[in-house]
Amino acid sequence: MSDRGEELSASLGAVRERIRRACEESGRSEEEVTLVVVTKFFPAADAVHLIDLGVRDLGENRDQEASAKVAELGELVAPELWSQTRMHFIGQVQTKKARSVARYADVVQSVDRPKLVRALDRAVGAAVEAGERSAPLDVTVQLDLEEGERTGRGGIAPSEAPELADLVAGTEHLRLRGVMAVAPPDLDADGRRKAFERIAASARQIRGAHPDADWVSAGMSGDLEDAIAVGATHLRVGSAILGSRQSHR
Ligand SMILES: *Cc1c(COP(=O)(O)O)cnc(C)c1O
């Protein structure tokens, strides 16, 4: 294996060990938790190493970078492995990019407004029509825990999320899977726990109306243990595995 392959193997192993331990501490099965490795800012070659190491869920947050990387990976990864790899779009989606994202995303985690729901539904319908995809698009509703603070990270207020979830569930081409949230940065341990409890409460509320929508995507490099403790089913981990953007190259 190349040096970079060795490096990624070690950091991925360390994150998997953190997940194993956190699951053990909260009495959960590791099988309930999907690790989405966020490869934004890093080259397709890194994603190839990760797929070789058993990663099957990749996360990207910008359409331009994601669509180029997906095209490269389609060439670089063996077809039977590539067909098992899911691409999660986790960044803000401009409505005009919906058609592009619908070509390659298996999941859009960052659905946060009615206009985007309608645009994605139409875009997936058009992509199916054009033979570019067959499956519906899995979607989570992104919660904004810092309502009104204009963080630019996107998301909908938890109080408005159930209505948006209903809208997703009523579309033809989108499948409501649950919720996603980014815990506000710079919280102390107590504040972080409270933030994750709010995410879990919102997730329960939406699951009450839509029992199949049982995904809770929460937890990143710095806080995945807190997320696992409140029942996260999907972790989105970038820097703890790939390194920080600055130190790379
Ligand atoms: C970049 C990103 C992540 C990964 O964050 P790390 O702290 O690098 O693990 C997770 N979620 C979203 C929405 C992101 O944009």
Image (cartoon, helix red, strand yellow):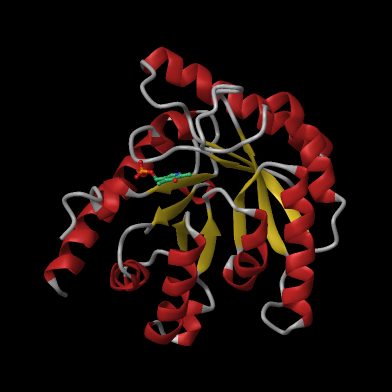
* Residue 76, picture quadrant: bottom left
Residue drawn at x 43%, y 28% is 226
- Which residue is farthest top? 190
Q: Is residue 44 left or right of residue 32?
A: left
Residue 45: x and y, percent? 29, 73
Residue drawn at x 28%, y 52% is 241
Residue 92: x and y, percent? 56, 48
Q: Is residue 193 left or right of residue 140?
A: left
Position of 126 relative to 212 (above/below): below
Residue drawn at x 29%, y 70% is 49
- Which one is in front, 217 or 173? 173
Residue 96: x and y, percent? 66, 60
Residue 107: x and y, percent? 61, 59
Residue 32 can be seen in this image:
yes
- Which one is in front, 166 or 114? 114
- Which residue is farthest left? 3
Which quarter shows the C terminus? bottom left
- Which one is in front, 98 or 158? 98
Which quarter shows the N terminus? bottom left
Q: Is residue 80 left or right of residue 200?
A: left
Residue 27 can be seen in this image:
no
Q: How many marks?
A: 0
Position of 116 relative to 101 (above/below): above
Residue drawn at x 51%, y 17% is 194
Q: Quadrant of ligand 1?
A: top left
Q: Is residue 248 left or right of residue 60?
A: left
